Image (cartoon, rainbow, N blue to C red):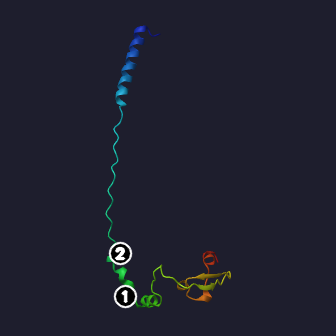
């Protein structure tokens, strides 16, 4: 039950033919180049067209609160107010527009801690 020389030659020929077919199938693949996407156009701010963007102007209570201390530019200088934390007792100098009442001031550390 062995293979004679003719059978071995036929087997070799079949294997070589199979290899040559596989080599043709493994041809280098064509890769697609990624194209750079164009920038998306800026979207329109839809909040400006909503009624909620103007609601605060109609609200009299909010308008009264905003008139007390209107928004200020950050470039304006201020005279710092010296306040004492009611929890830990630490004294700090802060922007007076951030403090509503000197007696009720709480520093950032005490404000963020539990309790």
Nearer the observer, 64 or 96? 96
Q: Which of marks 2 and 1 is nearer the N terminus?
A: 2
Nearer the observer, 101 or 24? 101
Residue drawn at x 32%, y 56% is 38
Determine which of the numbered discs, if any, sits on residue 58 in the image: 1
Whole-number angstrom distance, CA of label 2 to CA of label 1: 17 Å
Q: In this view, does 68 lie to the left or right of 112?
A: left
Residue linked to disc 2: 47
User: SS of the residue at dot 2?
Assistant: helix
Image coords of residue 102 (percent x, y):
60, 88
Asked if marks 2 and 1 touch (Cβ < 8 Å), the reply is no
Residue drawn at x 41%, y 16% is 12
User: SS of the residue at dot 1?
Assistant: helix
Image coords of residue 19 (percent x, y):
39, 23
Rendered position, 25 above or below 90: above
Please tell me how many numbered marks the rendered image carries. Answer: 2
Q: In this view, does 111 lie to the left or right of 10?
A: right
Crowd band around label 2 with a 10 angstrom C-alpha radius: few (<14), some (14–19), many (20+): few
- Residue lying furthest right: 89
Nearer the observer, 92 or 77? 77
The image quadrant that residue 14 belongs to is top left
Q: Is residue 114 left or right of residue 72?
A: right
The quadrant in which the C terminus is found is bottom right
Determine which of the numbered discs, if any, sits on residue 99 in the image: none
Image coords of residue 7 (percent x, y):
41, 11
Image coords of residue 58 (percent x, y):
37, 88
Q: Is residue 1 in sight in this rendering?
A: no
């Amino acid at each position: 039950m062995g293979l004679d020389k003719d059978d071995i030659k036929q087997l070799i020929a079949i294997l070589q033919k199979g290899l040559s077919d596989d080599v043709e199938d493994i041809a280098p693949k064509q890769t697609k180049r990624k194209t750079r996407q164009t920038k998306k156009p800026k979207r329109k701010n839809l909040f400006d067209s909503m009624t909620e963007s103007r609601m605060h102007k109609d609200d009299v209570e909010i308008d009264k609160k905003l008139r007390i201390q209107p928004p200020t530019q950050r470039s304006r200088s201020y005279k710092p107010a010296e306040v004492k934390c009611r929890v830990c007792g630490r004294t700090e100098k802060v922007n007076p527009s951030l403090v509503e009442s000197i007696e009720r001031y709480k520093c950032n550390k005490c404000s963020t801690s539990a309790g």
